[in-house]
């Protein structure tokens, strides 16, 4: 058991991170198994999202995430699963604000 205050805190923080990482890994494994069991567009989307989340949180390496997503895409293609259409609207540029023209400084007499 640690004696130093900072070491005690590291034990607490590491414990919380361990639980958080375990939840992310479990969600990833579940999503991958669900897709493997019955390939569908929705399951594909969930699995890809779970992979992205795990990579973002550094639970898995980004190259491993890319490899897993490629393998998912190959499996989806083999099962004739079309990726779900994106429901996001394309981003539009915000309207430019008009700034009033600056007046010339008044002449001094």
Image: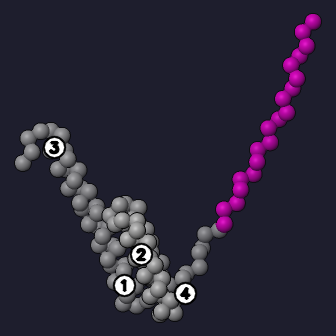
What residue is disc 4 on? 82
- How many angstroms separate mark 4 from mark 3 (CA)? 51 Å
Q: Earlier in the sequence, mark 1 or mark 3?
A: 3
- How many angstroms separate mark 1 from mark 3 (CA)? 40 Å
Q: Are marks 1 and 4 in contact (CB under 8 Å)?
A: no
Against 36, residue 8 (above or below) is: above
Against 37, residue 18 (above or below) is: above
Quarter of the rendering occupied by the C terminus: top right
Instruction: Identify the residue shown where x is 29% and y is 67%.
Output: 23
- How many angstroms separate mark 1 from mark 2 (CA)? 18 Å
Instruction: Identify the residue shown where x is 32% and y is 64%.
Output: 59
- How many angstroms separate mark 4 from mark 2 (CA)? 19 Å
What residue is disc 3 on? 7
What residue is disc 1 on? 34
Label 2 neighbourhood size at 10 Å, few (<14), some (14-19), many (20+)?
Answer: few
What residue is disc 2 on? 67
Instruction: Identify the residue shown where x is 22% and y is 53%.
Output: 14
Camera-side mark, 4 or 2:
2
């Amino acid at each position: 058991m640690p004696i130093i205050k900072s070491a005690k805190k590291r034990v607490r923080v590491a414990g919380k991170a361990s639980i958080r990482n375990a939840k992310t890994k479990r969600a990833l494994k579940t999503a991958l198994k669900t897709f493997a069991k019955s390939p569908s567009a929705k399951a594909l989307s969930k699995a890809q999202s779970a992979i992205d989340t795990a990579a973002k949180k550094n639970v898995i390496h980004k190259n491993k995430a890319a490899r897993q997503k490629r393998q998912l895409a190959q499996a989806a293609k083999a099962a004739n699963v079309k990726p779900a259409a994106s429901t996001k609207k394309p981003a539009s540029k915000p309207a430019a604000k008009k700034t009033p023209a600056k007046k010339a400084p008044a002449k001094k007499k």
